[in-house]
């Protein structure tokens, strides 16, 4: 038995060469260059290796306590408390995931029973619209069933067929001509369900197919009448359906170009109008903000944003969020849109010619950095302020005590307590952002002109990114179903 224990102890000791590598790594990191040279020289002459080998044999024979580094490396594979907690959380998530899947199966079963009940009523009702509605429900239930069977994994390995796309478009126009609002909603949502169901790597191509098939009949007619009429219908469910599909199309630069065909900004204007009419944080408002944020990659849409007072609206939304709860998505996408608006040469020139308005914007943004706003919004606000920290706005900067207030913010933010690792990372990101954007630069190394020519937001870079990545995210919210 002792022999067995002895062999077990021997196999558990770490390899001396491995320990040597750890020591060398530490010496390099700590800049102990002389010690490192001596250590490496001794290893090369095999003196240390032989000594360590002999020492290990002595340890096994005499039972002498091993150096602490042996114990540390021996227990290197032991799980930390954090890893144990993560494993527990993972098990809980898996359990909840299975519960959700089971609930989905039960809901699907109930839906099938209801469909069968409606079918039995169809014969007595003799309603053609009811028959078509039932067929559409069947199709959609079939798609959701596939999602449940695949346990939430995207099943789509091919795009919507040409025939299916054509059928959807034909049905959409027929329902529009018949003024059948529910029918239009069903077709629009069916297209979106297809978009959500398809594998992420194929989503970009799906958007291109929607454009190629001219789903809104924009290029064929050289007009926007159809989609504008849909946006004008005062029906919340229809507005949800149409804005969610427009958001899918606007997910690529080519999609934005389709929606602003020949430089016509009528869809953008309608979306801004709908945005302002919605309750703050509502699902439709989220889709409107998603559309506007994605479309803001094209500088040509920015004048429409400015003249439709989107800057003021976003600032007011952030202001409201200080005292009332507003959906995090709205605040994140709205503040990102604001940064994209202020960044453009058009807006900066506009603000130069509107000094009072520029002062108001700067003052309000500086107030926000003192308020308790979410970190992503704070970062976007700081980015906006960095765009305004130019010589052209020196007067406003002096009036608003810009430099002092930024310094005060950095001083305050650098000592705030963080509750967890994620919060600490956010804090570091914010402070790094401030150091990068507001710290005085060495003009001898100034390459601002080069940076301006290579801005990440240029359309060419976005096209290149889309071609390389190919994966898009389509928005989907838990509270969409009414």
Image (spheres, grey):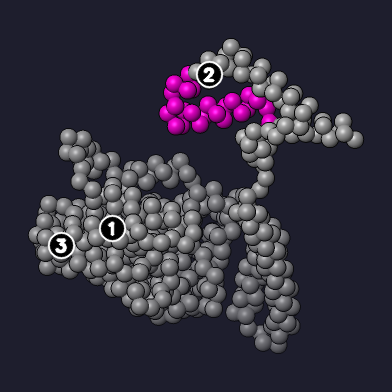
Task: State yes or no: discs 2 and 1 in contact (Cβ < 8 Å).
Answer: no
Q: Contact (CB < 8 A) between labels 3 and 2?
A: no
Who's the residue at 25% across and 41% down the image?
A: 451
Q: On the image, numbered disc 2 is attached to which residue?
A: 40
Kindly indicate the quadrant of the structure image that contains residue 127.
Answer: bottom right
- Taken as a whole, is the magenta stretch helix, strand or loop? helix
As drawn, the residue found furthest toward the top would be: 45
Residue drawn at the location 45% of the way across and 79% of the way down? 236
Give me the C-alpha separation between circle 2 and circle 1: 46 Å
Residues in magenta, as a range: 14-37
Q: 253 and 345: which one is in front?
A: 345
Please name which of the two marks, 3 or 1, marks the residue nearer to the observer: 1
Q: Nearer the viewer, residue 292 or 259?
A: 292
**Residue 139 makes an appearance in the image:** no
Q: Which residue is mark 1?
A: 411
Q: Give the structural element (helix, strand or loop) at label 3.
A: loop
Tell me the distance, in whole angstroms, between the alpha carbons under discs 3 and 1: 15 Å
Q: What is the quadrant of the C terminus in the image?
A: bottom right
Residue 401 higher or lower than 76, as above or below: below
Q: Which mark is residue 401?
A: 3
Where does residue 72 sit, x and y in percent of width and height?
A: 63, 39
Q: How many numbered dots are placed on residues in this image?
A: 3
């Amino acid at each position: 038995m002792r022999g067995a224990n002895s062999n077990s102890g021997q196999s558990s000791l770490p390899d001396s060469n491995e320990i040597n590598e750890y020591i060398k790594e530490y010496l390099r990191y700590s800049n102990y260059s002389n010690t490192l040279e001596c250590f490496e020289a001794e290893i090369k002459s095999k003196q240390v290796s032989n000594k360590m080998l002999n020492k290990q044999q002595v340890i096994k024979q005499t039972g002498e306590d091993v150096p602490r580094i042996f114990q540390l490396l021996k227990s290197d594979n032991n799980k930390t408390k954090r890893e144990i907690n993560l494993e527990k959380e993972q098990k809980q998530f898996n359990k909840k995931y299975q519960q959700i899947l089971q609930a989905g199966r039960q809901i699907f079963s109930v839906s099938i029973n209801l469909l069968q009940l409606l079918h039995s009523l169809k014969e007595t009702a003799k309603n053609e619209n009811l028959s078509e509605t039932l067929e559409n429900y069947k199709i959609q239930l079939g798609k959701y069933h596939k999602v449940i069977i695949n346990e939430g994994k995207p099943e789509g390995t091919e795009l919507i067929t040409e025939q299916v796309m054509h059928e959807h478009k034909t049905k959409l126009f027929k329902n529009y001509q018949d003024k059948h609002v529910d029918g239009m909603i069903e077709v629009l949502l069916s297209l979106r369900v297809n978009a959500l169901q398809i594998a992420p790597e194929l989503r970009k191509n799906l958007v291109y197919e929607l454009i190629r098939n001219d789903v809104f009949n924009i290029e064929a007619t050289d007009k926007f009448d159809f989609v504008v009429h849909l946006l004008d219908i005062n029906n919340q469910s229809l507005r949800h359906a149409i804005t969610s599909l427009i958001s899918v199309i606007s997910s690529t630069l080519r999609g934005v170009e389709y929606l602003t065909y020949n430089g016509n900004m009528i869809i953008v204007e309608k979306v801004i109008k709908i945005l302002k009419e919605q309750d703050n944080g509502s699902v439709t408002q989220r889709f409107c903000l998603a559309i506007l944020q994605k479309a803001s990659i094209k500088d040509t849409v920015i004048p429409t944003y400015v003249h439709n007072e989107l800057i003021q609206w976003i600032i007011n939304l952030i202001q409201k969020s200080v005292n009332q709860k507003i959906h995090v998505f709205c605040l994140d996408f709205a503040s990102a849109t604001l940064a994209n608006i202020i960044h453009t040469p058009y807006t900066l020139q506009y603000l130069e010619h509107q000094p009072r308005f520029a002062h108001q914007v700067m003052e309000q943004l500086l107030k926000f950095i003192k308020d308790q706003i979410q970190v992503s919004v704070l970062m976007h606000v700081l980015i906006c302020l960095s765009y305004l920290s130019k010589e052209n706005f020196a007067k406003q900067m002096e009036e608003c005590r810009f430099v002092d207030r930024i310094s005060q913010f950095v001083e305050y933010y650098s000592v705030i307590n963080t509750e967890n690792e994620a919060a600490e990372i956010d804090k570091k990101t914010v402070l790094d952002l401030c150091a990068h954007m507001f710290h005085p630069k060495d003009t001898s190394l100034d390459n601002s002109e080069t940076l301006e020519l290579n801005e990440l937001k240029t359309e060419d870079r976005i096209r290149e990114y889309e071609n390389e990545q190919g994966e898009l995210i389509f928005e989907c919210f838990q509270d969409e179903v009414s």
